[in-house]
Amino acid sequence: MSVAMAACSLGLHLSPDNNNNNNNNNNCFKVLEKSICSVSMLKTTSMYDTIKPSSILHKTRLSSSGFTIIPRATAISNVEDGNQGVADIVPTPIVIIDQDSDPDATVVEITFGDRLGALLDTMNALKNLGLNVVKANVYLDSSGKHNKFSITKADTGRKVDDPELLEAIRLTILNNMITYHPESSAQLALGAAFGLLPPKEQVDVDIATHLTVSDDGIDRSLLYVETADRPGLLVDLVKIITDINIAVESGEFDTEGLLAKAKFHVNYQGKAIIRPLQLVLVNSLRYFLTRPSTEESSF
């Protein structure tokens, strides 16, 4: 009773009326009962607090043990970590085919943030195309991990100069990236046909296409092409250039997500391209790259 009365003195005013006293006493017992319940709840909460870290450690061990099976960039890992509202940012996949930097080999560079491994499957796929990987190295910078290969033809030991084989190399690398990193398909033109996640938006070809020709010495010119990527684009570009009797010496073809960027060293009869021919070249490429696609059955 003394405990109850002490509790009453904290939160209630006493009245001389007996009925009121009885009511107040009942209220005091209710207050005391609530206090006891709140104490038990605190004890219960503290008990669970002591259990909670072990359950967190258990979850962490489960997610880390599945690291080799589940790719780093998956929504599943976010759910397991409890960060369901945090979306993982997928880096832009980049594939560069360089014909300029090495006179004896075709240099291929592949970047996809820090998600790529040793790319042994990609190297085996390139060997199936009749190619040898004569040198490979890896370097890191702020954009991620860069895997670099020097490739030659297995039968001649020389660099690749066939546009169709160069395009096959590019598509093989992109296909392997989509296979082992399905999240990349949403950022690749190839993902629209073969990827698990097609691109959410299509690139406007008219806006994305940029063409320039500039002199690169007295005996050659530099053609720069930027446009929406699509399978077979490298072969088509070289064909259009050579159809107007312009020779392609070397160049570089980059695939950066949904865009393709190419630099070609070109000449006309061993000389830099004169201004009128530059206009013919640019107009021919622009017409081909931006023309609307029409089904043959509509004719």
Image: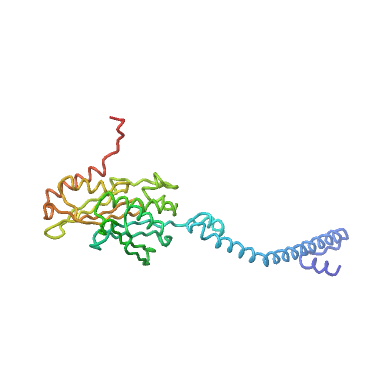
Q: Which residue is drawn at 26% across and 40% down?
A: 291
The correct choice, above or below, for 299 with respect to 7 in the image is above
Across and down, in percent, residue 279 comes to 15, 48
Q: Residue at x 30, y 55 (%)?
A: 254
Q: Which one is nearer the viewer's eye here, 155 or 214?
A: 155
Horizontal relation, residue 234 to residue 197: left or right: left
Across and down, in percent, residue 131 comes to 31, 56
Across and down, in percent, residue 153 comes to 28, 56
Residue 38 position by quadrant: bottom right
Applied colour scheme: rainbow
The correct choice, above or below, for 200 with respect to 117 in the image is above
The correct choice, above or below, for 240 with respect to 81 in the image is above
Q: Which one is nearer the viewer's eye here, 50 or 114?
A: 114
Task: Specify the quadrant that holds the N terminus.
Answer: bottom right
Residue 22 position by quadrant: bottom right
Across and down, in percent, residue 90 comes to 43, 56
Task: Specify the quadrant that holds the C terminus.
Answer: top left
Q: Which residue is drawn at 86% across and 63% down?
A: 16
Residue 50 position by quadrant: bottom right
Horizontal relation, residue 126 to residue 211: left or right: right
Residue at the outermost right position: 18
Q: Which residue is drawn at 31% across and 34% down?
A: 295
How many numbered circles are shown? 0
Residue at the outermost front position: 155
